[in-house]
Image (cartoon, helix red, strand yellow):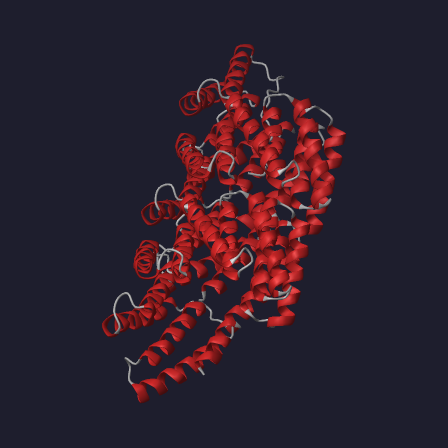
Amino acid sequence: MDNLASTYLQQGRWTDAEQLFVQVMETRKAKLGEDNPETLTSMGGLASTYLQQGRWTEAEQLFMQVMETRKAKLSEDYPDTLTSMGGLASTYLKLGRWEEAEHLFVKAIETRKTKLGEDHPDMLTSMDNLASTYLQQGRWTEAEQLFVQVMETRKAKLGEDHPDALTSMGGLALTYLKQGRWTEAEQLFVQVIETRKTKLGEVHPDTLTSMDNLASTYLQQGRLEEAEHLFVKVMETRKSKLGEVHPDTLTSIGGLALTYLKLGRWEEAERLQVQVMEISKMKISEDHPDTLASMNNLALTYSAQGRWEEAERLQVQVMERSKMKISEDHPDTLASMNNLALTYSAQGRWEEAERLQVQVMERSKMKLGVDHPETLISMNNLALTYREKGRWEEAERLQVQAMEKCKAKLGVDHPETLASMNNLALTYREQGRWEEAEQLQMQVMEKCKSKLGVDHPNTQMSMNNLAWTYSQQGRLEEAERLQVQVMDTNKTKLGQDHPYTLISMANLAASYMEQGRLEEAEQLFVKVMETRKTKLGEDHPQTLASMNNLATTYSNQSRWEEVEQLFVQVIEKCKKKLGEDHPDTLTSMANLAVTYKNQGRLEEAERLQVQVIEISKTKLGEDHPCILTRMNNLALTYGAQGRWDEAEQLQVQAMEECKAKLGVDHPTAQLIKANLETIRRGRRNRARTWAPGSLTRIFSRLLS
């Protein structure tokens, strides 16, 4: 019966396995006693079942009991004792207690080395497990070295195509995947798949696992069609062989859903993710890590659709259950806190985002180490929040630190290193440090092309960001060239209405507008807006951004009635969707105020501008850079009303704050300085015929 229970365990029939192990264990306890070796075998099998079910505390208690009994009855270095030790170490690994896992695996290795020799299969299994621990700890170089050592020994002792040798190759491939060495990961996975197909058959569970991992590699490489094809193939085979509700089947469905998410096919992604989540809740448990992972993935899809309340609700559930089920500082818990913080950021709730991100970063440093990849990601995320809040020096300091650690830990061309370089470049750009931004973005683009290929989404993103920097520098032809290239590639690779394609079209339209090619800009903005309305809905944040941008184009054409209509619509939808004090709501209100001013409706403009400044100060803080622009615009309205003293006083205040905050060379400082001179001239001449540029802000979202 123990053997049958073990079979159920292998098949993912965990409830059946548990029932049978409990039945056998209770019978053996009654017949043979608690300390009998056969009773302990059943207890070990039950502990392994708990491990698979995500009932890690129960697994830990049972493995500990079995191990201690075997130590007392058999000896510390008896093979069965070491097996229980390995089970307990694997449980610690799941619990994120990596130092304890490492300690036990090392202890098992030392004992087996002495008792069995370096090449014994059990010894190699312990080394393989230790390599997996290093992988979790972000100690990828050590993981790689150990996987290579085990793999080479197994090849020599057992043959290249022995299942254990293939297991080590799979572990090494996963290490390459973590290191961003996707080509090497792909080559190894392909080799493992081909060998397993020959030795075990196409539909063997181990073959399907390798295929699933290869599909995940394609996903990282941006080869989305190949990823989709492989995930579908594995999913269909697993449904047929294992059933629709087997954990491995659910893994494939989840992988396919993430591919749909990347492809912008959000309805299909959502449908699959809901299916996985419901089955996981029913078949495994509401708080199993796999269930929580499925809830998290569904929340990501909601976020992509701008359904932030639904995303937040799910993410709060995941975070609370992770804290209660696992621990407050488990990596999965920290990841859930990070995801919730990103949802807060998207809603402009930066104080809440910052609070969570600081917690995540501090706990990551303490739990994982200051240079663990997850710690570095948390530093980057906190820096992005600082940037949104206009705290650019703090953002820069954190981003430089993260970038340097990424280079040292992961390598100069690892995707996370490139992401940190990109983020630092965007902070430089916010500060008007165009040359530094350009230098970094050029490096990122070249490395992405070399590492990932020209068509990879990350490469396209880097080209897009460089183009935007060119645009800010007035290098409009260079910007346009890059943007056309990005748009055409996205259309070919992702489709005409993929979110990334639409972003690239919007950015190209913005370049046309800067060049005064207003009809071309209008055509593109209209196309983007209509597609987003159809694909995302009328009140999705990106749809609202399109409406804002189209209104800006109309503004440049002096089509004031159309401008006003669009801005009023955007404001109402932003208030309803995002809240009255969301940054995008405030931007659209500021833009409407500029429209009123341009129409000569100065009292309405002033009323709205004062309101926007007051809310901005409360929401964003007194020294947020956007407030300086809004003070500048209000000063221009005062000037247009002939209220020269108030205009000059406000503009001088804006100028002084701008110098202190951004420096005299920042573009905003230059704009305010020019407008201050205009106001002073107007005051001298008592003229009201001038119209200095209070620019309507475009909030087309960059990929960042």
Residue 98 seen from this side: yes
Q: Residue at the far bottom: name it.
A: 31
Q: Position of residue 123 (x, y in %)?
A: 38, 59
Residue 539 seen from this side: no
On screen, residue 159 above or below 620: below
Q: What is the count of numbered marks?
A: 0
| Residue toward you, 314 or 261 | 261
Q: Position of residue 94 (x, y in %)?
A: 40, 60
Q: Position of residue 353 (x, y in %)?
A: 43, 46
Q: Quadrant of the N terminus?
A: bottom left
| Residue toward you, 269 or 648 | 269
Q: What residue sits 39% from the left and 33% below the top?
A: 401
On screen, residue 436 above or below 604: above
- Give the quarter of the image for residue 409: top left
Q: What residue sits 47% from the left and 19% below the top?
A: 648
Q: Quadrant of the C terminus?
A: top right
Q: What residue sits 50% from the left and 70% below the top?
A: 281
In the visual, does 160 lie left or right of 124?
right
On screen, residue 625 above or below 655: below
In the visual, does 570 lie left or right of 343?
right
Q: What residue sits 62% from the left and 33% below the top?
A: 464
| Residue toward you, 571 or 141 | 141
| Residue toward you, 472 or 381 | 381
Q: Position of residue 388 (x, y in %)?
A: 47, 37
